[in-house]
Image (cartoon, grey):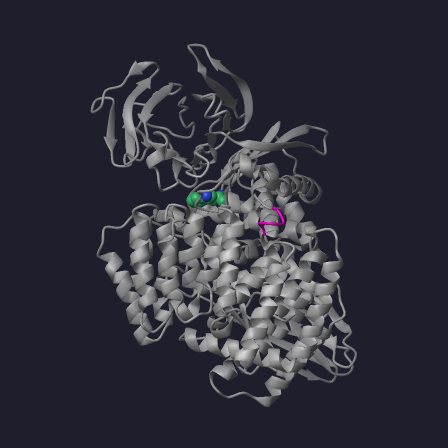
């Protein structure tokens, strides 16, 4: 590397810090301008760093290190993927320092002009790195070896460096950009998976076109490579011109991937591609600014997926994830602002808060400034900061300056942890509707909260006040709407315009309004949400054994209407028929009762299934007939929606199994669904239903599990589904099953996907994991300890369920805490130590 003195620095030269992880690097030599440097004289080695005592402006520094990728089980730095035998890198956030000594910080943007890779030709025919390939050929001294030289003209921080060396298959295509440049696209995987790459390629082409159309952003290199790797800590990585992907987010075909997998492939391919501008061209000054690139890029991928499929469906899905995942994170000891203020290990801050709440914050800019204003802000952001490492404040300033508005108060979203609450109070007299909004949050001063609002005529369902964005900026504010006639119903926080909890001041939600909105709201998101609130009410009434007949009647009506809806928007219909998840429901409880909640939700589900069994069956059979008549397998919105709806109905039908007779009928239905499935979506839905069957359904369950396993023929992603289905089953002895599966020859703690599919999935099986014996906690605690020795990024993530112990009753809480204390007494990785110690604080 060539050193360049910081032109802003004045004073005596100070030592230059090169970061390096001595636990995996063996330093051989350091040279400056060709001269070998002496340890203790010219440089010093300390834990985590090498100090160059007298750096010289313009000097060329060379470091030579040894490392053993085969032993790198952390999957950070350079490692060997066992499944494919390929070597690959993962440098974000701090993996480059596990490859060599270097100023490994995001604001050090350098051009990597000649990355030379060399390997055995036969065993490693593919040699890839960032940018464009300058040269390749046979090594002159040894014709069994070859080399490639890569050069990336764009300055980049080291976290965006990548190299891949292996025996890979690929598919190739191209994309001609809006200005007529032809870009070569290539997607690589293990040769046996090449037939599963076309959806990723098509998604990439769609992403490139969408970014040009929506934001005027064009791709900038001559080629774009994507590599699928089985062992990967996260979803994917946006390395410049050489994305590395977890196989789970690239490989997809109808036989092995569900519709959700297809949707994820499209979303994650888009996400990594969009990083080329929001992350790579403009990057983060420091890791506290992570949401600058991640929140913005998640927002961009959400918008992309919404445009490719259905906007309301995508919004519902995104808010479901936010509520289930981020709200609980924000209510626990890992609560942090989207721009965190401190960390021990940065890897622990790739969180739901930074990513998905971060995306909600970006969405609020758009809501406040309008899409046109938002686009103006984006344009200015790139004009001012292309090629730089900047901050969230710079982004906010671009939005404010481009629109000539003051966003000072909005900046509180970057520094305030926790989920704000917005309370509302309404009155209506003499044709004037009055709405009082108040806010409370962990910010000392009020936040800037956009509340999208509409009013509907109660008699006709017509919008009398179309969606209007109310800007709540004070602790409490009153808004009036006059000139109205007849009764009206308010629709608040339309399209979920801010990541807040909404509640009436009185504490009593008007359920008749909810029932009206569930049937007639013109805002698709709020129509769905009103139904969810009614279901929530009934589930809690069931839990407390105090069912109100009025609530029951509203729920019945909402469910029946959703069921009988004549629409082709089958996904919306499916979501309207789906009860809120246990994790979303638990957000409503001060002290979470996981088993009670599981039972209450189950009871409501079964009661609805019994009440509407014949209507459910008719719709299910109708869909089955339509689908059987189809000759072509499609993954468009309509086909996905149809499968989603039919699988939702299957769940209801299979929940009716009190008597032996009913158990047999449910097992037969699920088995038929499983056996006749045309793709993985239906197959896994059938298997999922069978997985929880016992008694008269046990034989069918075991038979289907075996068939599914055999059909998988060792396919890693399909086997993950097999493990997961069993880990989340609703069976009394699920923990023993999981323990046995952990010893299965196909199980390994070394592969993060496999770990997540069994261990993390079990921790999400709330009733089983939280069994009052505490055995679930013990199992997780000991597995985390085992895993921490291999892969701290994954072990620390697995501890996230245990640190929620304060949310549970005394007995459960103490049992969970005891596991954290056991871990705390061990020698832990930094990553896990940070989570455990936060959990015990
Ligand atoms: N930007 C990428 C982050 C990432 C990562 C972070 C820590 C450890 C491993 C990792 N692999 C990828 C992913 C993204 O948001 O696009
Ligand atoms: Zn990202």
The image shows residue 265, relative to residue 602, as above or below, that is: above
Q: Position of residue 627 (x, y in %)?
A: 72, 60
The quarter of the rendered structure image containing the N terminus is: top left
Asked whether residue 115 is in view, the answer is yes
Classified by dominant secondary structure, the portion drawn in magenta counts as loop
Numbered circles on residues, count: 0
Q: Position of residue 264 (x, y in %)?
A: 58, 50
Asked whether residue 521 is in view, the answer is no
Q: Position of residue 201 (x, y in %)?
A: 63, 39
> Is residue 6 or residue 714 the one in the foreground?
714
The image shows residue 555, relative to residue 798, as above or below, that is: below
Specify whether residue 255 is painted magenta: yes
What range of the chain is rendered magenta? 253-257
The image shows residue 108, relative to residue 442, as above or below, that is: above
Residue occupying image coordinates x 68% and y 74% = 617
Residue occupying image coordinates x 43% and y 27% = 7
> Is residue 217 or residue 630 the one in the foreground?
630
Residue occupying image coordinates x 61% and y 51% = 263
The quarter of the rendered structure image containing the C terminus is: bottom left
Left or right: 835 as drawn, with respect to 264: left
Q: Position of residue 456 (x, y in %)?
A: 73, 75
> Is residue 274 or residue 234 the one in the foreground?
234
Specify whether residue 167 is painted magenta: no
Residue occupying image coordinates x 76% and y 72% = 463
């Amino acid at each position: 590397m060539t050193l360049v003195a910081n032109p802003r620095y004045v004073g005596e030269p100070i030592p230059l810090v090169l970061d390096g992880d001595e636990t995996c690097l063996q330093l051989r030599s350091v040279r400056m301008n060709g001269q070998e440097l002496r340890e203790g004289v010219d440089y010093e080695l300390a834990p985590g760093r090498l100090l160059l005592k007298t750096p010289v402006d313009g000097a060329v520094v060379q470091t030579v290190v040894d490392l053993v990728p085969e032993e790198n089980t952390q999957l950070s730095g350079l490692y060997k993927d066992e499944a494919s035998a390929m070597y690959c890198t993962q440098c974000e956030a701090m993996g480059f320092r596990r490859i060599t000594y270097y100023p490994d910080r995001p604001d050090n943007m350098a051009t990597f002009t000649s990355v030379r890779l060399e390997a055995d030709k036969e065993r490693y025919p593919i040699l890839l790195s960032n940018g464009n390939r300058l040269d390749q050929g046979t090594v002159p001294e040894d014709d069994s070896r070859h080399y490639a030289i890569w050069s990336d003209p764009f300055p980049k921080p080291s976290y965006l460096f990548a190299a891949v060396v292996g025996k890979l298959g690929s598919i190739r295509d191209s994309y001609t950009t809006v200005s007529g440049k032809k870009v070569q696209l290539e997607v690589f995987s293990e040769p046996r998976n090449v037939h599963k790459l076309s959806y990723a390629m098509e998604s990439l082409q769609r992403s490139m076109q969408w970014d040009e159309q929506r934001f005027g952003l064009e791709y900038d290199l001559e080629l774009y490579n994507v590599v699928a790797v089985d062992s990967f800590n996260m979803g994917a990585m946006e390395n410049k011109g050489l994305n590395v992907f977890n196989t789970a987010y690239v490989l997809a075909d109808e036989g092995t991937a569900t519709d959700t997998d297809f949707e994820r492939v499209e979303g994650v391919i888009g996400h990594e591609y969009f990083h080329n501008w929001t992350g790579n061209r403009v990057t983060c000054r420091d890791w506290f600014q992570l949401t600058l690139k991640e929140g913005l890029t998640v927002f961009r991928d959400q918008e992309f997926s919404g445009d490719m499929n259905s906007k309301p469906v995508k919004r519902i899905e995104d808010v479901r994830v936010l509520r289930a995942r981020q709200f609980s994170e924000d209510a626990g000891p890992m609560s942090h602002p989207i721009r965190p203020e401190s960390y021990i290990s940065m890897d622990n801050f790739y969180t739901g808060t930074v990513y998905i709440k971060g995306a909600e914050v970006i969405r609020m800019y758009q809501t406040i400034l309008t899409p046109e204003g938002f686009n103006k802000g984006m344009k200015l952001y790139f004009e001012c900061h292309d090629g730089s490492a900047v901050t969230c404040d710079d982004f906010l300033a671009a939005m404010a300056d481009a629109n000539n508005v003051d966003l000072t108060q909005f900046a509180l979203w970057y520094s305030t942890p926790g989920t704000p609450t917005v309370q509302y109070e309404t009155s209506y007299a003499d044709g004037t509707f009055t709405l009082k909004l108040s806010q409370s949050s962990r910010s000392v001063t009020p936040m800037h909260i956009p509340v999208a609002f509409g009013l509907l005529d109660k008699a006709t369902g017509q919008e009398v006040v179309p969606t209007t964005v109310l800007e709540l900026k004070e602790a409490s504010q009153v808004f009036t709407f006059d000139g109205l006639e007849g009764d009206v119903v308010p629709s608040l926080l339309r399209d979920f315009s801010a990541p807040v909890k909404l509640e009436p001041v009185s504490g009593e939600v008007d359920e008749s309004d909810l029932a009206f909105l569930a049937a007639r709201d013109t805002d698709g998101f709020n129509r769905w949400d009103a139904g969810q609130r009614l279901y929530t009410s009934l589930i809690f009434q069931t839990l407390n054994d105090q069912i109100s007949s009025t609530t029951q009647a509203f729920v019945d009506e909402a469910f029946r209407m959703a069921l009988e809806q004549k629409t082709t928007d089958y996904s919306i219909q499916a979501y309207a028929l789906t009860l809120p998840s246990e994790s979303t429901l638990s957000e409503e409880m001060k002290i979470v009762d996981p088993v009670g909640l599981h039972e209450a939700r189950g009871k409501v589900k079964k009661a609805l299934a019994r009440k509407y069994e014949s209507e459910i069956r008719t719709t299910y059979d109708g869909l089955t007939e339509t689908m059987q008549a189809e000759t072509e397998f499609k993954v468009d919105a309509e086909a996905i929606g149809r499968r989603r709806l039919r699988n939702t109905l299957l769940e209801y039908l299979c929940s009716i199994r009190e008597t032996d007779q009913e158990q047999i009928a449910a097992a037969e239905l699920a088995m038929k669904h499983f056996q006749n499935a045309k793709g993985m979506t239906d197959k896994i839905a059938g298997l999922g239903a069978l997985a929880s069957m016992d008694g008269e359904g046990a034989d069918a369950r075991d038979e289907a599990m075996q068939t599914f396993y055999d059909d998988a023929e060792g396919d890693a992603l399909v086997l993950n589904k097999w493990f997961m289905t069993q880990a989340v089953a609703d069976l009394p002895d699920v923990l023993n099953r999981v323990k046995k599966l952990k010893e299965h020859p196909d199980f390994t703690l070394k592969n993060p996907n496999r770990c997540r599919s069994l261990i993390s999935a079990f921790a999400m099986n709330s009733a089983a994991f939280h069994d009052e014996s505490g055995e679930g906690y013990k199992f997780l605690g000991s597995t985390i300890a085992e895993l921490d020795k291999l892969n701290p990024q994954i072990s620390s993530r697995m501890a996230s369920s245990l640190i929620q112990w304060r949310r549970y009753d005394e007995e459960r809480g103490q049992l969970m805490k005891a596991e954290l204390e056991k871990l705390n007494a061990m020698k832990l990785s930094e990553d896990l130590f940070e989570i455990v110690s936060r959990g015990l604080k």
